[in-house]
Amino acid sequence: MLLLGAAGMSPAADPSTAKPPPPTASPGGDAAVPFLSFQGVVSSINAAAGTLAVTTPRGETRQVRCTAATLDRSGGTPVKLSSLKPGTKVLVRGRSGADGVLEAAFLTQPRPIPLPALQPQTAKPAAPTDKKN
């Protein structure tokens, strides 16, 4: 049995249960376009256009646009394309633009994680077993 409100509204039109529309924009860009994050190797740089091509470990080449707003995550300073060279490993985070080029918000060179030196392991003697038959 379906009960209607006093004004004869259907349940779908009830403003107390209506969901607000999703946001269309956020400070970082269009909220409908998710952030992408990937790493790869710089294969070419076009300083005049402010873009670089990054080849991912899967062999895909992605075009990345750096602007004055693109930050180096390690120092929080703007990225300078002149500091990058083909063969440089990079980690990129940004959103795809309307033209398919990734608009980089962050770009950094991943740093290797220092691991402690491994100590050689010595073989431990087997524990004695007491078997009684």
Image (cartoon, rainbow, N blue to C red):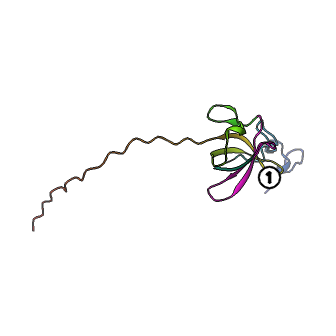
Residue at x-position 73% and y-position 37%: 70
Q: Is residue 20 above or below residue 56?
A: above
Quadrant location, the N terminus? bottom right
Q: Left or right: 56 with respect to 32?
A: left
Q: Nearer the viewer, residue 12 or 110?
A: 110
Residue type indicated by callout 1: Gly
Residue at x-position 75% and y-position 41%: 66
Please give the count of numbered marks on the rendered protein: 1
Residue at which label 1 appears: 100
Q: Secondary structure at mark 1?
A: loop
Residue 124 lies, in percent from the top left, at 22, 52
Q: Left or right: 116 with respect to 81?
A: left
Residue 35 lies, in percent from the top left, at 71, 46
Residue at x-position 76% and y-position 35%: 69
Q: Left or right: 115 with respect to 4?
A: left
Residue 91 lies, in percent from the top left, at 64, 45
The image quadrant that residue 56 belongs to is bottom right
Q: Which residues are magenta?
A: 46-68
Q: Nearer the viewer, residue 53 or 33?
A: 53
